[in-house]
Amino acid sequence: MSSFITDSFIWICQAVKWIVVLLDSHQGAFMVLLTTALVYYTYKSARAAVRNIELIKQNDDKRTLPYVVLEVMNDMPFYGVRMVNLGATAAHNVVVRAEPKIEMLFPNYRKSIKFIHEPVAYLAPSAHFETDIGSFRDIERENPSKIYTGTISFENGDGKRFEHEFVLFKFY
């Protein structure tokens, strides 16, 4: 066992000596290789840092955007609709396009909903507009499917426009 340890130690010492001689005789070539490797990995690291900065900016932009939604309110015996800004910043020029048209529907009475049929100039974070739209029977009479679909579009403070689709269907 002792001979194995001695032989291993001698072999390791010879390998280290061989590496030292090789590095000493080819110092310039190894320095070029080492410098090339350092430049390559520095470049990759810088590119990764740039990508991380871009992702941080995108996440920050998403986190600070307005986000406007329409929700169904069930205030028995009436149903209502609410427009709310769930985002962190104000929404500007909010426009709703719905099919079929969302209106206040009561017996012998129908009225346009201003915040749905006309653009909303400004909607602060957490702010909302809401109104009753009718009873289950009134909605079913005018819209047998009881489903409203459409799009909501709005701008952020920089004037960039966003749009998403919605489906309102909790009328039961």
Image (cartoon, rainbow, N blue to C red):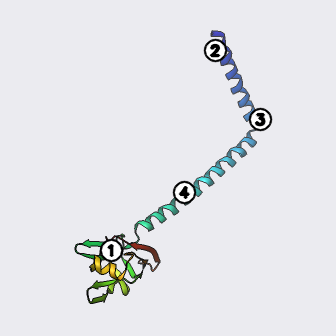
Q: Which residue is mark 3?
A: 25
Q: Is residue 118 above or below residue 60?
A: below
Whole-angstrom CA distance, mark 1 to mark 2, is 77 Å
CA gap, disc 2 to disc 4? 47 Å
Q: Residues within 10 Å of mark 1 (few under 14, many from 20)?
A: many
Residue 171 place in picture, x, y as percent: 32, 72
Residue type highlighted by circle 4: Ala
- The residue labelled by disc 2 is 5
Residue 105 visible here: yes
Dot in front, 4 or 1: 1
| Residue occupying image coordinates x 61% and y 53% | 44
The N terminus: image quadrant: top right
Residue 139 point in image, percent of width and height: 32, 79
- Where is residue 72? Give x, y as percent: 32, 72
Mark 4 vs mark 3: give the one in front.
Answer: 4
Identify the residue at horizontal 26%, vertical 71% (top origin): 74
CB under 8 Å between discs 1 and 3: no
Q: Amino acid at mark 2?
A: Ile
* Residue 163 pos. (x, y %): 46, 76
Q: CA distance from mark 4 to mark 3?
A: 38 Å
The one nearer the camera, 165 or 44, is 165
Q: Earlier in the sequence, mark 1 or mark 2?
A: 2
Badge 4 local density, few (<14 within 10 Å), some, or many (20+)? few
Residue at x-position 37% and y-position 78% = 144
Q: Residue tagged by mark 4?
A: 49
